[in-house]
Image: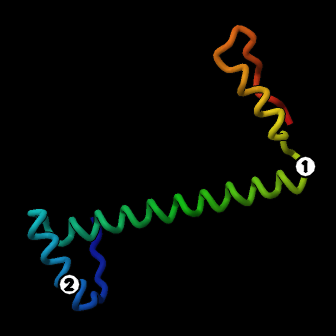
Amino acid sequence: MSTTSFRLDEDLEEKLEITATKLQRTKGWVINDALRQYITRQEQKLRMLEETQEAIADIQASRVVSGEEVMKWLETWGTVTEEKAPKV
C-alpha cells in the first residue's frame, strides 16, 4: 500500500475525525472507502456518457428499431408464440 499526502480543509479534517471515531475505523480507512466510492461513481458516469454517445451515433446512422416493433415483440413475451427480439 502506498502513502499519499494532501492538504485537507479544516472542516473536513474535523468531520473525518468524527466519522472515523463513530465508525471505529481509522481515518485512512474512511478516506480509502470514500475515494473508492467516488471513483466508482465517476467510472459509472463515464460509462453512461460513452453509452449515450454510442446510442446517439446509432440514431444518427438510423440503426434503430421502432417503438411499435418493440411493443409488438413485448406483447408476445410469455406466450406460446413468443417472438425473438426485433433486429435493426
Q: Quadrant of residue 77?
A: top right
- Three-letter amino acid code at the position of disc 1: Ser
Numbered circles on residues, count: 2
**Considering only vertical position in the picture, is 31 above or below 65?**
below
> Separation of disc 1 and disc 2 at Cα?
53 Å
Q: Position of residue 10 (x, y in %)?
A: 22, 91
CB under 8 Å between discs 1 and 2: no
Picture residue at 87% right of the left edge, 45% below the top: 63
Q: Where, quadrant-wise, is the C terminus in this rendering?
A: top right
Q: Quadrant of residue 49?
A: bottom right
Picture residue at 68% right of the left edge, 12% below the top: 79
Q: Bin the neighbour count of mark 1 within 10 Å (Cα to Cα): few under 14, some 14-19, many 20 and up.
A: few
Tag shown at residue 13: 2
Q: Quadrant of residue 7?
A: bottom left
Q: Position of residue 8 (x, y in %)?
A: 27, 87
Q: Position of residue 16 (x, y in %)?
A: 19, 77
Q: Position of residue 42 (x, y in %)?
A: 50, 65
Q: Relative to 44, is 32 on the left or the right?
A: left
**Considering only vertical position in the picture, is 87 above or below 15?**
above
- Residue depth check, mark 1 versus mark 2: number of the one nearer the observer: 1
* Circle 1: element type: loop
- Three-letter amino acid code at the position of disc 2: Glu
* Residue topped by disc 1: 62
Viewer-side residue, 87 vs 31: 87
Q: Earlier in the sequence, mark 1 or mark 2?
A: 2
